[in-house]
Amino acid sequence: MPLDQQSEHSDQPVDELDAKLLLLLTDEPRLGVLECSRRLGVARGTVQARLDRLVERGVLTGFPPALDLAAMGYGLTAFATVEIAQGRRAEVCEGLAAISEVCEVHATTGQGDLFVRMVARSNADLQRVVDHIVDVPHVRRLSTSIALSTPVPPRVRPLLERVKGRPPK
């Protein structure tokens, strides 16, 4: 069956055409719908419908620019395991979201309650960020590790390649 005629209600959340489209946009996020349709060999309406469906299902959440935080002056990345008062996750997450250097917060199992990725300009600046986190109401304890390098940066390509039917690079 041609890719642009596959069932819209597949058991798989992302099918081969979706994966090809997402790979194309991962590599070249500034491509327009018409150019995507040309490169994929499908109608422009098919590409637009697929993008709309991926957004509606929450698979595609946006097209943010890829930023180099070190080039912006935030050359230090750190991770923290945060222990919080029981039943206070929402308030703590709200407090963490108010700290601009906090990039991500994940609720976790195991040691600690939250896992936080943060950035800073220097070790002294990291201390300032850590002090802000510790000052968030209901934060009980914080354990921080500084990232020395990022040998595997955030990625989705291997997952998309698997769906597309090619072994990941």
Image: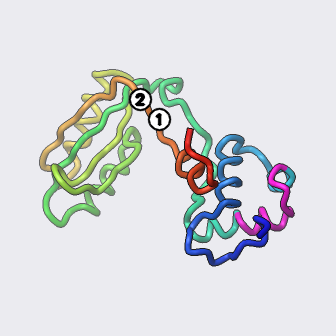
Give left or right: position of 49 versus 87.
right
Residue 166's mark? none
User: Residue placed at 57% from the left, 58% from the top?
Assistant: 61
Residue 150's mark? 2
Q: CA distance from mark 2 to mark 1?
A: 6 Å
State the image coordinates of residue 60 (x, y, percent, origin top left). Answer: 60, 59
Q: Nearer the viewer, residue 64 or 25?
A: 25
Where the C terminus falls, by quadrant? top right
- In magenta, the rendered stretch is 39-50
Q: Main secondary structure of the magenta part?
A: helix
Give left or right: position of 78 versus 111.
right
| Tag 1 residue | 153
Task: Identify residue type, mark 1.
Answer: Pro
10 Å crowding of disc 2: few (<14), some (14-19), many (20+): few
Q: Is residue 61 above or below residue 129?
A: below
Q: Is residue 15 above or below residue 33?
A: below
User: Residue placed at 58% from the left, 70% from the top?
Assistant: 57
Q: Give the quarter of the image for residue 147.
A: top left
State the image coordinates of residue 72 (x, y, percent, origin top left). Answer: 52, 27
Asked if the residues shown at circle 2 and circle 1 are in contact, with their CB atoms under 8 angstroms apart, the answer is yes
